[in-house]
Image: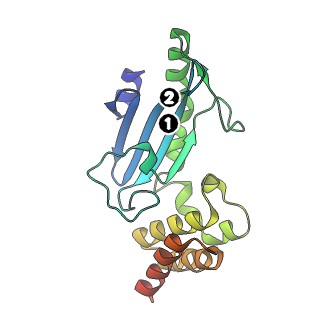
Amino acid sequence: MSEALTNAGFQRTAAGTWNRCRGDELNAIQLQEHSTKESFCVNLGIHYTFLPKAGTEASLDGDQIELPDCELKLRLTDQATVKDQWWPIAASSVGQIADLVCRRGLSIFDLYRLDGPIAAMDGKSIESGNPGLLASITKVRACLLLARMHEYLGNYDKCVEAATIGVKLAGMAVGPKKALQDILKRLG
């Protein structure tokens, strides 16, 4: 599996963990052992260099990221409709996982490229209950991610729209609400 990931631009950063940096896009793959069974899952992390670590305002250190610090965390499964899958810890799983990472995992990362489908998303999609690629995070965090992404990309109208919707949806989410209000103040 390491050879396939190396060929895709990933570097092994720890046992069962690989990172890739493509411009402003950070991808992480982490094998996670089940706490009570002899099985493991494959976690995928997606982040961008212009974002702070997830759930904080702390800056990233360099071009590598640990899975908990990724804004988006997903599980690799062999079917798009399945959200969680575990494999036995056995030699027979290695080839299957390597194939699945190359066949499905890499294409999942491509969906989150800044020149890909995520860049077309806007706050109205979140507000209307169609979070699409951002279904794994709360509506407020999705709006914050979109606002920050669109600000970075220079799409100021989409940025302000996402931030305004995010503030409206924030409720008691104090940290994201403040970050969204700061964006609105900055862009006037």
Label ID, residue 68: none
Task: Give the structural element (helix, strand or loop) at label 2.
Answer: helix
Q: Give residue 81's position: percent from left, percent from top.
A: 72, 38
Relative to 2, 127 lies left or right: right
**Would you say the residues marked 1 and 2 are in contact, meaning their CB atoms lie under 8 Å apart?**
yes
What residue is shown at x 58% (from left), y 80% (from top)? 164
What residue is shown at x 46% (from left), y 65% (from top)? 149
Q: Quadrant of residue 186?
A: bottom left
- The quadrant of the image that shows the C terminus is bottom left
Which residue position holds label 1? Answer: 106
Relative to 185, 173 lies left or right: right
Q: Is residue 133 above or below residue 42?
A: below
Please state which of residues 180 and 21 is positioned toward the viewer in this rendering. 180
Q: Give residue 182's position: percent from left, percent from top.
A: 44, 81
Which residue position holds label 2? Answer: 102
Q: Give residue 26's position: percent from left, percent from top.
A: 39, 48
Q: Give residue 160's position: percent from left, percent from top.
A: 52, 80
How far apart in space, not on screen, are marks 1 and 2 (Cα)?
A: 6 Å
